[in-house]
Image (cartoon, grey):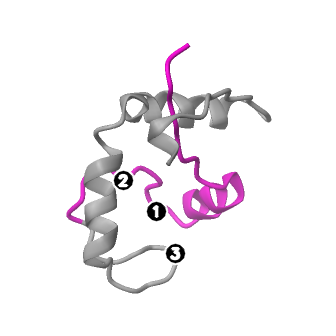
């Protein structure tokens, strides 16, 4: 089994954002303000984001988000390894 990792948005926050007409998909790093805190993203955030998008599982993020919106519960299984350290 390959080593994969994913971040998933809280469904409650997603529902509230959709009610207000705000997009829940962030597909670019050009967003300069954190939507959760209202503060600008730091240089450290951008460094970590560049590393995160290189992980093998990042390409499946949209699929996981779709599954999460279609189902009440999903189970993701991952193995510990170098990517987690």
Question: Is residue 27 visible in the rendered structure shown here?
Answer: no
Quadrant of residue 43 within the rendered picture: bottom left
At x 37%, y 28%, the residue is 56
The residue at the point 64 percent across, 37 percent down is: 69
Q: Does 29 appear in magenta?
A: yes
* The magenta segment: 1-30
Which residue position holds label 2?
26
Horizontal side of residue 27 vs 67, given as left or right:
left
Badge 2: few (under 14), some or many (20 or more) residues near its Cα, within 10 Å?
few
In front: label 1 or label 3: 3
Going by the picture, which residue comes out furthest to the left? 30
* Sequence-first tag of 1 and 3: 1
* Residue 63 highlighted magenta (yes or no): no
Q: SS at mark 1?
A: loop
Q: Which mark is residue 22?
A: 1
Q: Which residue is mark 3?
A: 36
- Could you tell me residue 82's position as x and y percent? 46, 38
Residue 3 image point, x, y percent = 50, 26
Front in this rendered view, residue 74 or 5: 5
Q: CA distance from mark 1 to mark 3?
A: 13 Å
* Element assignment for label 2: loop
Nearer-the-camera pick, 84 or 36? 84
Task: Measure how far apart labels 2 and 1 are at the Cα level.
Answer: 11 Å
- Dividing the image into 4 quarters, which one contains the N terminus? top right
In three-dimensional space, the C-alpha distance between marks 2 and 3, rounded to whole angstroms, equals 13 Å
Residue 37, placed above or below residue 77: below
């Amino acid at each position: 089994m390959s080593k994969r990792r994913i971040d998933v948005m809280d469904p409650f926050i997603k529902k509230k954002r959709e009610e207000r007409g705000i997009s829940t998909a962030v597909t670019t790093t050009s967003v300069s303000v954190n939507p959760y805190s209202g503060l600008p993203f730091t240089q450290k955030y951008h460094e970590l984001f560049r590393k995160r998008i290189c992980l093998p599982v990042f390409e499946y993020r949209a699929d996981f988000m779709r599954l999460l919106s279609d189902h009440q519960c999903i189970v993701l299984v991952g193995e510990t390894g170098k990517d987690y350290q």
